[in-house]
Amino acid sequence: MSNTNSDGYYEVFWPRAPRQMRTKPLAPRLASLEGKTVAQLWDYLFKGDEVFALLEEGLKARFPGVRFVSWREFGSTHGGEERAALAALPQRFKELGVDAVISGMAC
């Protein structure tokens, strides 16, 4: 232990590094899901299969004509292949005509 008199002031270390990326503006919200295609992404943890079934049911009742692309189409968004899976998403979304995404993840 040091004998230096600190007068109640101590040096501290801030553990966060400087930001590596600038924040980007969010995409504008859709006015409605009517007639839109919604992709489902999931990390295969917790009960996403049950949650997405309930979400589909509720959203179809509220927005007739909404279409869903199942999480089964994309594979897990977590784990050893997550970087490649996420990098492939923009192209897959274009191919499938996706307008919006619901991303489910367990904590």
Image (spheres, rainbow, N blue to C red):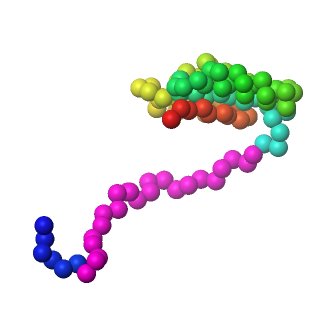
Residue 49 at x, y percent in the picture? 62, 20
Whether residue 64 is visible to the viewer of this picture, yes or no, is: yes
Residues shaded magenta: 7-29
* Residue 26 coordinates in the image, percent (x, y): 66, 50
Front-lying residue, 10 or 64: 10
Q: Quadrant of residue 62?
A: top right
Q: Residue at 27% across / 70% down in the picture?
A: 11
Farthest-out residue, top? 72
Where is residue 35 shown, x and y percent of the image?
Answer: 84, 30
Instruction: Answer yes or no: is residue 69 visible.
Output: no
Give the overall secondary structure of the magenta segment: loop
What's the residue at 53%, 32% (across, down)? 106
Q: Looking at the figure, which quarter contains the N terminus?
A: bottom left
- Residue occupying the point 35% across, 62% down: 14
> On the rendered structure, is 18 left or right of 44?
left
Give the answer, above or below, for where 32 lies relative to 53: below
Which one is nearer the viewer's eye here, 96 or 101? 101
- Report whether 101 appears left or right of 86: right
Q: Position of residue 70 (x, y in %)?
A: 67, 21
| Residue 74 falls inside the magenta stretch | no
Which residue is found at the position 48% from the left and 29% from the top? 78
Magenta stretch encompasses residue 25: yes
Side of 84 where 4 appears, left or right: left
**In the figure, residue 65 lies in which quadrant?**
top right
Q: Quadrant of residue 23?
A: bottom right
